């Protein structure tokens, strides 16, 4: 594919149509009736042009769990979903708690060449919650880590959490907390409520999430540091974050696509595709997190893309692993749950799925306006399309999507990373190690 691309007639952030000229990795011009000698002209009439999507919460599994996903296969999934950058969670083996491991992940992402892979460092050594990891060394490494999380495990010790929040202030880092009080969720299998009572499954109470968020926003206020709440899922959590923001506390929060759309009623079929951490909640919670995203209490949408091999999901509910893949379906689910309901417009989608995630993660070159001189990180989306989501839509290694067989709106038509198409007319384009 030529380096010079001319997209004609795309609706920038869902607004007015314009031509977008891409050359040498940057947006050269935005306007009407553009032309350029040697350009590959692409009919983008009616497509929505968004800044390339950025996911602040992706599990790529490599090193250590390559049966589930690798940096390469996860990059394919990301590009297929319209993403140009992903933040890779540290629950690998070895855990990404040293400069060496995060630099290895960065190099694997560069070799794949499909998206920017930005490592997240662990907060504690081995994610065990006992002592701080090498936060400063990871921050000053070539990976330039700015987000730290023990995701999969809560930083439960308040003293450790306080010290982490204090430490990252030196380089404007952020602690991304997996809010789950472990003593309140021992043996839990699904959301605690009427459905869990009927099914006889151990319940996962909302207060297990809410109590940690309440503690941590107060700690963040006390030390004057940045806190990010991972995969917020309950109405009570929305209210706590809303209170903290009104108080002036520097807290941001994310919601996953599945918590915007799916409820605990789906657990009745014991289909382990719906087993996830935090669990699917009540309809009331779904409506509350939608409202929170719409009014800005919740800052971003993050996928929590969590691939697993078939044997980890094709088993009885109690033994099944938690997690869903979500990169390929995220934009379509946000389209259905937030845009079709009138809660967000496409400019809002650009904000919550690109601009703000890049800002929270201090990721240069992403989440930028679609304007002349900006890096060419772009997603072109057909909002008029509609179809059944199938395993053919999954570009990663695992198939544990809750949306297979479900009709969803939209289709990612083009993804452009560093000025080069990684998806063209809906098909993956590879020139890196996986080509």
Image (spheres, rainbow, N blue to C red):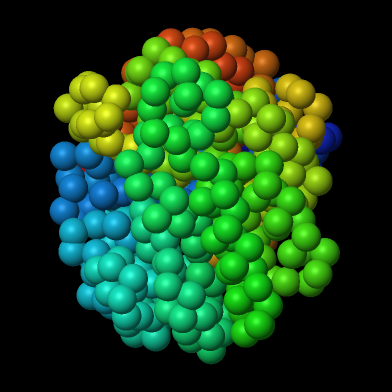
Residue 38 figure quarter: top right
Work out whether 99 lies above or below 275. below
Work out whether 245 lies above or below 41. below
Residue 254 image position (x, y, % from top left): 59, 50
Residue 140 image position (x, y, % from top left): 39, 84
The residue at the point 33 percent across, 71 percent down is: 129
Work out whether 11 lies above or below 232. above
Image quarter hosting the C terminus: top left
Report the residue that reaches farthest toward the bottom.
170
Residue 336 figure quarter: top right
Which of these two is toward me, 251 or 393?
251
Left or right: 152 with respect to 54?
Answer: left
The residue at the point 65 percent across, 34 percent down is: 285
Left or right: 28 with respect to 151?
Answer: right
Q: Would residue 295 be visible to someone looking at this image? A: yes
Work out whether 332 lies above or below 415. above
Which of these two is toward me, 134 or 150?
150
Residue 348 figure quarter: top right
Residue 350 image position (x, y, % from top left): 68, 44
The residue at the point 51 percent across, 80 percent down is: 162
The residue at the point 42 percent across, 73 percent down is: 157
Image quarter hosting the N terminus: top left
Residue 189 image position (x, y, % from top left): 37, 34
């Amino acid at each position: 594919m030529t380096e010079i691309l001319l997209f004609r007639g795309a609706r920038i952030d869902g607004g007015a149509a314009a031509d977008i000229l891409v050359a040498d990795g940057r947006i050269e011009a935005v306007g009407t009736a553009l032309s350029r000698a040697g350009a590959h002209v692409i009919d983008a009439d009616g497509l929505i042009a968004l800044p390339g999507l950025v996911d602040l919460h992706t599990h790529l599994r490599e090193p250590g769990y390559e049966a589930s996903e690798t940096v390469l296969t996860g990059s394919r999934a990301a590009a297929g979903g319209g993403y140009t950058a992903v933040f890779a969670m540290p629950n690998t083996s070895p855990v990404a708690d040293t400069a060496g491991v995060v630099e290895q992940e960065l190099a694997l992402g560069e070799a794949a060449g499909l998206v920017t892979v930005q490592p997240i460092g662990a907060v504690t050594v081995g994610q065990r919650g006992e002592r701080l990891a090498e936060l400063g060394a990871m921050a000053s490494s070539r990976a330039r880590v700015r987000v730290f999380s023990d995701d999969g495990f809560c930083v439960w010790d308040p003293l450790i959490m306080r010290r982490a929040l204090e430490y990252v202030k030196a380089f404007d880092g952020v602690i991304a907390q997996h809010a789950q009080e472990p003593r309140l969720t021992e043996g839990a299998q699904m959301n605690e409520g009427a459905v869990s009572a009927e099914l006889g499954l151990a319940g996962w109470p909302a207060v297990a999430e809410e109590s940690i968020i309440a503690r941590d926003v107060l700690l963040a206020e006390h030390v004057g540091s940045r806190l990010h709440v991972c995969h917020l899922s309950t109405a009570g959590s929305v209210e706590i974050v809303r209170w903290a923001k009104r108080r002036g506390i520097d807290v941001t929060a994310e919601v996953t696509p599945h918590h915007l759309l799916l409820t605990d009623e789906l657990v009745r079929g014991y289909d382990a595709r719906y087993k996830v951490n935090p669990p699917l909640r009540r309809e009331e919670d779904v409506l509350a997190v939608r409202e929170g995203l719409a009014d800005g209490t919740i800052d971003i949408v993050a996928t929590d893309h969590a691939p697993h091999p078939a044997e980890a999901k094709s088993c009885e509910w109690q033994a099944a692993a938690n997690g869903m893949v979500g990169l390929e379906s995220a934009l379509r689910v946000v389209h259905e749950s937030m845009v079709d309901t009138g809660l967000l417009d496409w400019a809002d989608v650009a904000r919550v799925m690109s601009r703000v995630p890049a800002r929270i993660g201090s990721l240069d070159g992403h989440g930028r306006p679609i304007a002349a001189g900006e890096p060419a990180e772009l997603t072109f989306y057909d909002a008029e399309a509609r179809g059944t989501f199938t395993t053919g839509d999954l570009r990663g290694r695992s198939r544990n999507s809750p949306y297979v067989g479900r009709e969803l709106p939209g289709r990612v038509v083009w993804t452009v990373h560093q000025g080069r198409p990684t998806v063209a007319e809906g098909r993956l384009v590879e020139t890196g190690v996986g080509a």
